[in-house]
Image (cartoon, rainbow, N blue to C red):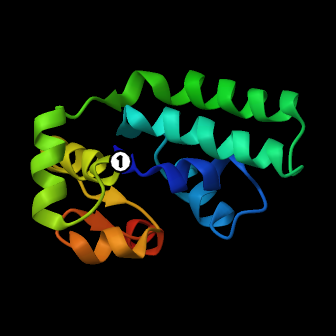
Amino acid sequence: MVLVDTNILVALLVRNTPWFSQARALYERDEDWRSESHAIVELTNVLTRYVRVGEFEVEAALGMLDVAQERFSGGLHAAPHSEAMRMALGTKVSAYDARFLVAARELGVKLTTEDTKLRRAAPDLTQSLEEALAT
């Protein structure tokens, strides 16, 4: 099982991201990817921005969203809002990011993320793609 932040989901789905190859290698090694339930909301927002700036056609973005929902919706963890707030206050990260940290704590696995601020705020609950591939 691999717990991933939204930026890792984006990296797996969008080839022109800096971490595409690493995300693909991680997924090929372990297809049991989990995330916090808010990840699909964030992914939808990212794909919408890609469409608005002309990087993707609407149908391509919708196709990526469909793939993500099909592959990952069964592995989404809903962090309790109160726990996310406590985590956000304790780590000084956004409540959105704190949801992923709560999921890591509750699932007992490190969150794989390329968000360096998040990794600095909670090094015991996070790891980079490079670290995930090294284990």
**Is 3 in front, or is 84?**
84
Q: Residue at x 31, y 72 (%)?
A: 119
Q: Residue at x 16, y 32 (%)?
A: 80
Residue 32 in sight = no
Give the image location of residue 78, x and y in percent: 27, 29
Q: Is residue 26 left or right of residue 76?
A: right
Left or right of 80, for residue 30 = right
Name the residue at 46% across, 46% down: 30
Image: 81 above or below 134: above
- What amino acid type is highlighted by mark number 1? Leu
Residue 106 in the image: state x and y as whole percent: 14, 42
Question: What residue appears at the point 70 percent right and 42 percent down from the top-left corner?
Answer: 47
Query: Is residue 18 something one can see in this rendering?
Result: yes
Q: Quadrant of residue 62?
A: top right
Quarter of the image for residue 21 reads bottom right
Check disc 1 and report the residue beneath it: 3
- Is 12 situated left or right of 39 in this image? right
